Amino acid sequence: MEALVITEDHRLVVEARPTPRPEPHEVLVRVAGAGLNRADLLQRMGAYPPPPGAPVDIPGMEFAGVVTALGDAARVVAVGDAVFGIVGGGAQAEYLAVHELHCAPVPAGYDLVTAGGVPENFITAHDALRTIAAVQPGERVLIHAVGSGVGTAALRLAKAWGCPTVGTARTPEKLERARELGLDHAVLAERELDPEALAKRIVDEAGPCDVVIDLVGGEYVRADVAAAAPRARIVLIGLIAGSRSGNFPVGAVLAKRLTLVGTTLRGRSVEEKAAATAAFTRDVVPLLAAGTVAPVIEATYPLAKAEDAYARLASDATFGKIVLTP
């Protein structure tokens, strides 16, 4: 098979690799679409190694495709099924071996390339909003980096569940596109961040927020606390702005009785990923099938143009998702 490979000097090349053989509870998937994520950029630079068992030099954390073979003990899916899901790595290749419980059914007639841009975004957003934050209809949801892949997914799920939404982005263009997706309140986040000023604009525009989906981290966490309503839940997913926040307002966390939770999918156990996939299948796949929610696909690239795809994502100019097409 052909696979995208990260070389020792951090280049991306397409190489011939052996087609993987599925373990007893795995299935072999011929990949039609594999979404590109910021974690892939970090892995390329050696800053985010894959978990044990995943290929060390073939990136890719999500996939959509057709099952072509089963492991000896696989019973959940069948050959010919269209599936999508998350993996620790290896999805940016023609074939992928994946645990059967990490596969969700693609809705009938759904484009498989488009489906390749769904799982990481929507499983992450669903897990943060529903499983961790237990969001309820009518609660105000704040989404930082609302124009990102996970940001647009969180926006669409929050709207589908009857929640007013607030979004931040660093360009007016991204905010305008988010408004077209239904964003209720758009707040520009200046590149030279003043957390207190950002929080004030958020509260002045929309009011205190009950749930915060923070895909940026760093000093944004101070803005999260300042903009949070009493007993709000803050879910920290990304660290684009760094892994530290100076002068963290511990007193405000106590006074407001806030919950601050960090989360990531990639390093979870087989069982935890299976539970997240099952929840996604139960709650989100029907919304995708009905057209109530949909991924935002910025562009698609063949594996041979992966350098261009990675550069486009790194430019921070994308809105939504980039998908590679093995």
Image (tube, helix red, strand yellow):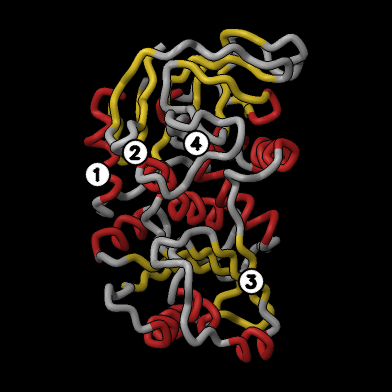
Please tell me how many numbered marks the rendered image carries. Answer: 4
**Is 34 in front, or is 83?**
34
Circle on res. 61:
4
Mark 4 element type? loop
Instruction: Say whether residue 201 is left or right of residue 283.
Output: left
> Which label's residue is closer to the chain start, 4 or 1?
4
Q: CA distance from mark 4 to mark 1?
A: 18 Å
**Is 23 in front, or is 232?**
23
Between tags 4 and 2, which lies in front? 4
Q: Residue at x 63, y 27 (%)?
A: 103
Q: Residue at x 50, y 20 (%)?
A: 65
> Which label's residue is closer to the chain start, 4 or 3?
4
Q: Classify 200 as above or below 164.
A: below
Where does label 1 land, which residue? 312
Three-letter code, disc 1: Arg
Q: Are marks 2 and 1 in contact (CB under 8 Å)?
A: yes
Q: Are marks 3 and 2 in contact (CB under 8 Å)?
A: no
Q: Residue at x 43, y 29 (%)?
A: 58
Where does label 2 land, which residue? 322
Mark 3 element type? strand
**Residue 109 location (% of width, % of height):** 50, 20
Viewport quadrant of the N terminus: top left
> Which label's residue is closer to the chain start, 1 or 3?
3
Query: Crowdedness of circle 2 by 10 Å Cα count: few (<14), some, many (20+)?
Result: many
Mark 2 element type? strand
Circle on res. 260:
3
> Which label's residue is closer to the chain start, 3 or 2?
3
Three-letter code, disc 3: Leu
